[in-house]
Image: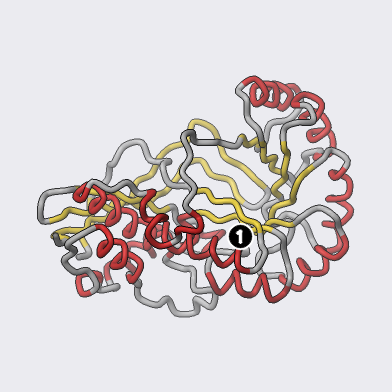
Amino acid sequence: MRIVELTAFHVRVPLKRVIRHASHERHSSDNIIVRCLLSDRSVGYGEGVPREYVTGETVEQSLQLLKRSRLDEQVSSCRDFVAAVAMAERLRLAPVPGDDRECQGHAARCAVELAILDAYGRCFGEPLSHVTKLIAPDLYQPRERIRYSGIIATSRGVKVRLVALLMRVYGFRDIKVKVGIPRYNDRARLAAIRRIVGSRIDIRVDANEAWKPDEAGPRIRELQRYGISSVEQPLAHEDFDALTDLRRRIDTPIMLDESVCSLKDAERAVQAKACDLFNLRLSKCGGFIPTLRLAQFARQHGIGYQLGCQVGETAILSAAGRHFA
């Protein structure tokens, strides 16, 4: 079975409310959708979410990168799902000049990889979860139910108390709270949230690179009294030395998100002993398979991790298609 067409779409999804955190504000979500058509007419879709403030890539750059990546020369006929997964892992996009972190183009690669895996999965009757079973059996842990975590971003005052109450009523076991947003009182918000959700719900905080090295320690210590389990990306993503120093000075585990978008990033973080946890997401890490490889790397080096994704934000495919293979 072979690929006969790959088509990329730019899809802009207006958001009903502004998504705001310490380092960015979004009124819409600009995504890349890739459609993969096989010779038996099986069709698969994949999505990537370029975020310039995370990996330095935009939608337009991603589409141009796909055009010059010679994907038609990298795909081959696959007789089974095993061969398709192996082919998907081998996919490489054209190098991006100045990309020292080796992560620019990850959203585009994610969209292509997921589309190919989806198409071949439909063709051979295999679920996407079997990719994990094939290439990372040590991570394969089937679950009967999907577990979601809640997030509290810009709510404050009466609204933050209402949102926290809803989180408790809906039965969330863990919540992430955005902190470090200008003119927001993090202590008051955390106190209200903890008071309402009780002691059994896990609360972690995400600063999105908001703090400077000399202020991060005191800010985190102020929040420790509310039983936070970790602090995500407290400092700028490139400042591994400061992250290492901060980790020595606080008791709260540090999770890295913007700092870990590639294997090269992960190696630097481990070498610097800059964190306790990785936040791994499909789009910024280049796809499902690279994300699994990063999870394996984390395990090998005693780093905890959580797996998530930004894909799935698109409701309807619209806009003109752009062919690149």
The answer to whether residue 67 is above or below residue 186 is below
Look at the numbered disc 1 and give the secondary structure of its residue. Answer: loop
Residue found at x 16% / y 48%: 42
Residue 24 image position (x, y, % from top left): 60, 50
- Residue 243 found in image quarter: bottom right
- Say left or right for 72 vs 133: left
Name the quadrant of the N terminus: bottom left
- Say left or right for 244 vs 19: right
Residue 36 image position (x, y, % from top left): 22, 54
- Say left or right for 58 vs 74: right
Name the quadrant of the C terminus: bottom left
The answer to whether residue 172 is above or below residue 118 is above
Front-most of 116 and 47? Answer: 116
User: Which residue was labeled with disc 1?
Assistant: 258
- Residue 87 found in image quarter: bottom left
Callout 1 amino acid: Glu
Residue 51 image position (x, y, % from top left): 50, 56
The answer to whether residue 129 is above or below residue 278 is above
Figure colour scheme: secondary structure
Residue found at x 71% / y 50%: 207
Mark 1, Cα crowd under 10 Å, few <14 / some 14-19 / many 20+, is many
Front-most of 207 and 194? Answer: 194
Front-most of 200 and 193? Answer: 200
Residue at the far left in the pictured view: 40
Residue found at x 54% / y 51%: 307
Tally the marks.
1
Residue found at x 60% / y 69%: 266
Residue 96 image position (x, y, % from top left): 42, 76
